[in-house]
Image: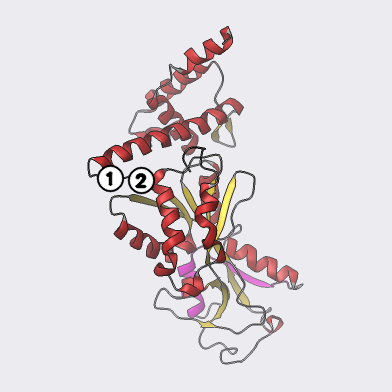
Amino acid sequence: MDRHGASVQRTLRQLSFRLLEVYVAVVRCGNMSAAARTLHLTQPTVSLQLKKLADILGEPLLESRDGRMQPTLVGHELYRAACDTLSRFEDVDAFIQQARGGSVGHINIGIVTTAKYVLPRILGAFYRLYPQVKVTLNIGNRAHILARFERQEDDLYLFSHPPSGGNVVSARIIKNPLQLIAPKEHWAVGRQQLNFNELKQERFIVREPGSATRLMFESWCSSQGISLTDTMQIESNEAIRLSVASGLGLSVISAHTLQEGREKPAVLPVVGFPLESNWYLVGRRDRRLPYAARLLVDFMATHLVECIQREWVAADIATLSERFNDYAPVGER
């Protein structure tokens, strides 16, 4: 080993888990104040830890962009290594706790809001088999969960329109058909078949820009050469369902969402509907999947048909374990 290599090795030995935890928290939160609250530290302490880390590596690790602290090129590589290192030792801790008869790990899952109607059914069955595994659900719209994915904040994700790129591993696990709904007293209720052109002058209640449901609906309209003239935006599926049932307009919504709540709007038999959509289980190829998360993947592959109706299960479930184990480090498969 040359002198430079030996010097780098000595430098990296000065790193501590606490320094890595602080750095990961700052990258995920985007500023030191929020990271300090998350870690139950003072902001000056976080600032000192970051300075110590930058001094050890001899490189700038963070820079301010768009009002957030973002990692530099070197900082991004350190962040990836830190996430992997901390995840590995969480697994070691899980195995130790398991040997003592305690906890066997923790899973962070980021899910889009529509998936909150179905994932608890899966997790309930998983918990009955693995009561020692703790799960944290982080729920938000697609933009929020995409941001969490970019910052590697969770182990697994559930998207109805997965992100793209070489770092993405995904599989369709649950069908998520999109239905066109109307108030029960709407003039079209009871018709055997409808052409969408008969409805395009109606008011449509749509999700926020970036929502996968809205993206699919707008894409379908574009493919049909249809432009909507009257739209109303609401970010909540529950509020959309209530608004439609109350007569505010029509909407396109997940069939799973319609099973919840007391408000039961009518489903219109429009040609081309339901729109075919799926929920995708998503992970990152550049982030090691923790032991507990792999347990959940294998559980879904084997038991999903016992948790939800068989007709909702998507075809990719047959190769789910294989897909998510393909990128596990050699020796861990």
Write down the region rendered in magenta.
227-245
- Quarter of the image where one finds residue 262: bottom left
Q: Looking at the image, is 199 positioned above or below residue 35?
A: below
Q: Write the residue at 52% across / 50% down.
A: 324
- Quarter of the image where one finds residue 98: top left
The colour scheme applied to this rendered structure is secondary structure
Q: Residue 188: x, y in percent?
A: 60, 89
Task: Give the residue type at disc 1.
Answer: Ser
- Quarter of the image where one finds residue 88: top left
Mark 2–mark 1 CB contact (< 8 Å): yes
In this image, 67 relative to 292: left or right? right
Residue 141 visible to an observer of this rendering: no
Q: Which residue is mark 1?
A: 103
Q: Residue 18: x, y in percent?
A: 38, 26
Mark 2 falls on what kind of element? strand
Q: Which residue is mark 2?
A: 106
Mark 2–mark 1 Cα distance, whole angstroms, equals 8 Å
Mark 1 falls on what kind of element? loop
Residue at the far top: name it: 3
